[in-house]
Amino acid sequence: MQVKIYVPKIIEIPSEFLPALAKRAADSLGEKAGEVSATRGHLVRQAVQDGLLREMDELIGQDGTVDLVCDPGMEIPLELENRTLTLSELLEALQYKRSWSEMKGKSEAA
């Protein structure tokens, strides 16, 4: 019998890498990036694919996907000021270091 298990592990991704990781994760989803809730998993899987976490290279499948889950049961969406962010919104917040109220005001003005 084969059983896949997920073992808790703490990793560190330098904050300065987060905008680039969010951009590549959003780019990989294309138009869906504006609909999909951003999760830690998106950022960590992208970091593994980019080679930032070499100790996790064995999690990269032959098709290039990363078999990794960050939150037991389901991946918990990332929030900013109590609002779930899409990958596109996360990217914008990280790139411009804006608060959600600033981003919301910008989108309502458009």
Image (cartoon, helix red, strand yellow):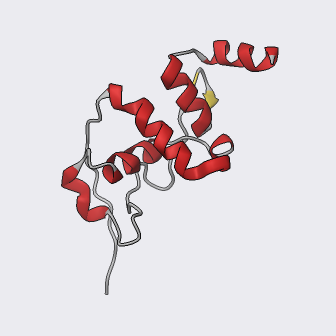
Position of residue 71 in the picture relative to residue 90 (left or right): left
Query: In which quadrant of the rendered image does the C terminus lie?
Result: top right
Position of residue 60 in the picture relative to residue 39 (left or right): left
The residue at 34%/53% (across/down) is 49
Please provide percent x and percent y for residue 73. Answer: 48, 56
Please provide percent x and percent y for residue 94. Answer: 49, 24
Q: In which quarter of the image is residue 52?
A: top left
- In the depicted structure, whether residue 47 falls above or below residue 104: below
The residue at 69%/44% (across/down) is 35
Res. 81 visible in picture: yes
| 51 vs 9, nearest the viewer | 51
| 25 vs 71, nearest the viewer | 25
- In the depicted structure, whether residue 90 falls above or below residue 59: above
Res. 85 visible in picture: no
Please provide percent x and percent y for residue 36. Answer: 63, 46
Query: In which quadrant of the rendered image does the N terminus lie?
Result: bottom left
Position of residue 26 in the picture relative to residue 53 (left or right): right
User: Which residue, as the protein is rendered here, is positioned at the far left?
Assistant: 55
Q: Quadrant of residue 85?
A: top right
Q: How many labels does the image show?
A: 0
The residue at 49%/38% (across/down) is 23
Q: Quadrant of residue 58?
A: bottom left
- In the depicted structure, whether residue 53 falls above or below residue 63: above
The residue at 42%/34% (across/down) is 20
User: Which residue, as the protein is rendered here, is positioned at the far bottom?
Assistant: 1
